[in-house]
Image (cartoon, grey):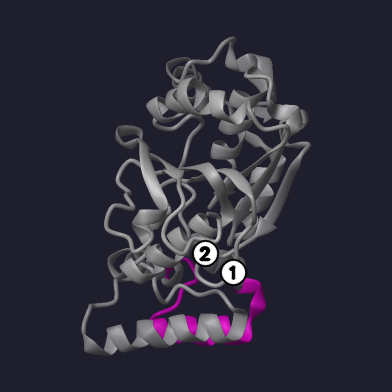
Amino acid sequence: MSLPPVPAGPAEAIELDLFLEALHRRWHYDFRSYSRASLVRRVELARERLGCATLSDLQGRVLRDETVLPDVLDAMTVQVSELFRDPDYFLSLRRNVVPHLRTFPSLKVWVAGCADGEELYSLAILLREEGLLDRTIFYATEINRRALARAEAGVYPIDRLPAFSQNYQRAGGTGTLADHYTAAYGRVAFDRRLRARTVFTEHSLATDQVFSEVHLISCRNVLIYFDSPLQDRALGLFAGGLTRGGFLGLGSHETLRFSSHAASFAAFDEPCRIWRRVASVGDAHA
């Protein structure tokens, strides 16, 4: 039986602030600048999963028991994705971005907030089919260790395949999705060669620094969970990490139009949420 929800009020708002501060100071996971509405739901889910009556009880467990941390992070991070999510985005990458990427002898691609890996494998399949996989290094980053391990494994329930395959075809796939995985015992495992040149690592857009000289950053449906200052920090990291002329892909409800870093980018395919790094006044890339 699930616990009743904690009523919202001034005391609960203080408890939430204290819980987030404790999580940051004890374990260095910083959710303090995440969207408040989303945080309330995610922390409430963590409280319920761990059977805590109040957020103060949850805080006490997090402070004193490291073993509950993975469960808390699972509740507080979102791993909802699918292969070739928003197919028009990948179709635009294939048709419009890949011709530019071909001009580089080697490539770096950063999948920021990779969740369970669907975005990574989508990009790896696309670049394999375009003959660019063997010259590409991927950085797949995530704050949730369990999600990162799932991404590295590349194994998904077979019942997700119909949606994956439909997206793949709509995204301009040149063969069949079955070319890239093996199926057995109700699961599919994606070809290990797709991730052979991938660095899987923990990374927080709230606290960590940037990868350098990256040609494509795909960070989709992550910024929507941040407040405005944290969105701006992340976009500053992306501006600093991209090569001049590099590409940034965001989620369908995300934009950098109102960011203080907007001058560092030019719209490349704005309907598909793709921008290109340009030089701006005082830019070190200039």
In this view of the protein, which residue sits in the foreground, 12 or 254?
254
> Taking the image as drawn, is residue 120 in sight?
yes
The relative height of residue 15 versus residue 67 in the rendered view (above or below) is below
Binning the other alpha carbons within 10 Å of mark 1 as few (below 14), some (14 to 19) or many (20 upward) gives: few
53 is within the stretch colored magenta: yes
The reply to whether the C-beta atoms of the residues labelled 1 and 2 are less than 8 Å apart is yes
Binning the other alpha carbons within 10 Å of mark 2 as few (below 14), some (14 to 19) or many (20 upward) gives: many
49 is within the stretch colored magenta: yes
Q: Position of residue 205 (x, y in %)?
A: 52, 64
Query: In the image, what residue type sits under mark 2?
Result: Leu
Name of the residue lying farthest toward the left: 9
Name of the residue lying farthest toward the top: 175
SS category of the residue bearing label 1: loop
Q: Quadrant of residue 186?
A: top right
How far apart are the alpha carbons under marks 1 and 2?
Answer: 6 Å
In this view of the protein, which residue sits in the foreground, 211 or 260?
260
> Taking the image as drawn, is residue 1 in sight?
no
Q: Is residue 278 left or right of residue 118?
A: left
The relative height of residue 96 versus residue 230 in the rendered view (above or below) is above
Residue appearing at x 56%, y 86% in the figure: 25
In the image, the segment drawn in magenta is: 48-68
Quarter of the figure with the N terminus = bottom left
Q: Position of residue 88 (x, y in %)?
A: 38, 25
Q: Is residue 88 left or right of residue 244?
A: left
Residue ID for mark 1:
208
In this view of the protein, which residue sits in the foreground, 159 or 113?
113
Give the label on residue 205, or none: 2
Q: Position of residue 159 (x, y in %)?
A: 52, 26
SS category of the residue bearing label 2: loop
Residue appearing at x 32%, y 37% in the figure: 270
